[in-house]
Image (cartoon, helix red, strand yellow):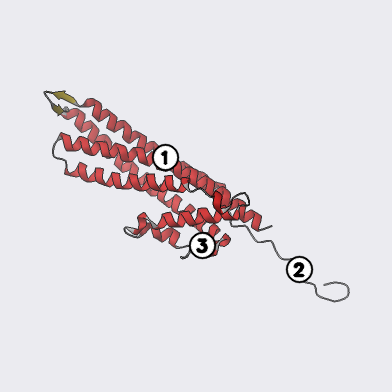
Amino acid sequence: MSSSGVLRPRPPIPRRTPGTSRGLLAGLCVVLAAVAAGDLFSLYIGARLRADVETDGGFAFVSEDRLDQADHLFLVYDQIHVFGLAACAAVFITWFHRMRRNAGSLAPDRFGRGPGWAIGAWFVPVAGLWMPYRIAVDMWSAGARATPAAGPAGVSFWPVNLWWGSFTGSVLLGWYANTGYRRAEDLHPLLDAGKLGVAAAALNIVAAASAAYFAFRLTHVLNLATAGGSR
């Protein structure tokens, strides 16, 4: 209250910018690196199994001891891989949802569904192979349009496309590899399943690296945009 007795409104409290902490991004990069390391181990197991294959008169065979060792290593890898993927999924979806909220505050007209779909879309059968990609594209577009240096003609979606293409490819190849491995009754189908597994692991390494790059770029752009809009 002033000396004249007239009430004057207080200046508004600055709104907190809904940015993403560096800790969350760093944690995401760590779990992605851990998943990629597990896939490198899978590549090693596959290469070791191929090296143990011997041929004689057009027939391929592997000693029972070597086959048992490879089977044991694959079992260990599968057990570790499940926990690694669960941790990676939890951190990634948390980050993805945070980014969707931030992007929605910048361009609410770009999104036809609420922020909760940044979580739920991953668990929708079949559509889960497409819906998260659409959300990622919309977030990328929102960040690009809100950044002064980027215009609609200059928006490049290759980081999103590379990440999603390699991710879905690794999921599908991994499913086929696991199906072939369970149905294999002799060495040749087992080796064929192993080739698919190696391809899936290689694609998953690409997916992990491209996901880290996509996450870093999107986080940086959206944080810049929200910080600029709060001034």
Residue sitting farthest toward the bottom: 5
Q: Hey, which quadrant is residue 71 in on the image?
A: top left
User: Answer yes or no: do the residues labelled 1 and 2 have beta carbons within 8 Å?
Assistant: no
Q: Amino acid at mark 1?
A: Ala
- Quadrant where the N terminus sits is bottom right
Q: Hey, which quadrant is residue 36 in on the image?
A: top left
The earlier-in-sequence mark between 1 and 3 is 1
Residue sitting farthest toward the top: 56
Question: In the picture shown, does residue 65 fall above or below 218?
Answer: above
Along the line of sight, the residue nearer the viewer: 141 or 189: 141
- Residue designated by label 2: 10
Q: Position of residue 29 (x, y in %)?
A: 48, 43
Along the line of sight, the residue nearer the viewer: 162 or 229: 162
Q: Amino acid at mark 3?
A: Arg
**CA separation in Å, label 1 and label 3:** 34 Å
Q: Position of residue 10 (x, y in %)?
A: 76, 68
> Left or right: 87 with respect to 196?
right
| Disc on res. 34 | 1
Q: Does residue 48 show up?
A: yes
The earlier-in-sequence mark between 2 and 3 is 2
